[in-house]
Image (tube, helix red, strand yellow):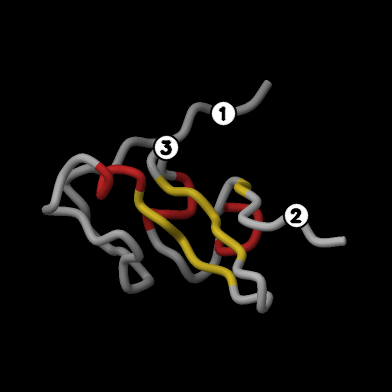
């Protein structure tokens, strides 16, 4: 059974083609019921300057914040 709307770090799947989103603290990986996968920018919730689902690869972004490394 697939976890509907599951969130996962985007770097796990999109490391090679998502640009800055791959290791951004504000990016979340969204999987649809149909199996499609999207990167969602959490900054878009409170700031309209950011696209909810940015066109990939993102090469520059004013909201980029490198995700803390897991120990």
Q: Quadrant of the N terminus?
A: bottom right
Structural distance between the alpha carbons of marks 3 and 2: 22 Å
Residue at (38%, 41%) from the top-left corner? 26
Image location (x, y in percent) of residue 66: 39, 36
Q: Which residue is mark 3?
A: 25
Q: Which residue is mark 2?
A: 3
Structural distance between the alpha carbons of marks 1 and 3: 10 Å
**Which of 28/13 is in front?**
28
Q: Which residue is mark 1?
A: 69
Residue at (66%, 78%) from the top-left corner? 34
**Which of 37/15 is in front?**
37
- Farthest residue toward the top? 71
- Farthest residue toward the left? 49
**Upstream in sequence: badge 3 or badge 2:** 2
**Which of 37/1 is in front?**
1
Is residue 18 toward the left or the right of residue 5 in the image? left
Q: Secondary structure at mark 3?
A: loop
Structural distance between the alpha carbons of marks 1 and 2: 25 Å
**Upstream in sequence: badge 1 or badge 3:** 3
Q: Nearer the viewer, mark 1 or mark 3?
A: 3
Image location (x, y in percent) of residue 33: 66, 71
Image location (x, y in percent) of residue 17: 49, 71
């Amino acid at each position: 059974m697939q976890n509907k709307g599951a969130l996962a770090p985007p770097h796990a799947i999109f490391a090679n083609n998502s640009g800055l989103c791959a290791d951004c603290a504000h990016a979340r990986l969204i999987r649809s019921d149909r199996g499609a996968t999207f990167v969602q920018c959490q900054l878009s919730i409170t700031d309209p300057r950011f696209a909810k689902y940015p066109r990939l690869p993102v090469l520059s972004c004013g909201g980029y914040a490198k995700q803390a490394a897991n120990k």
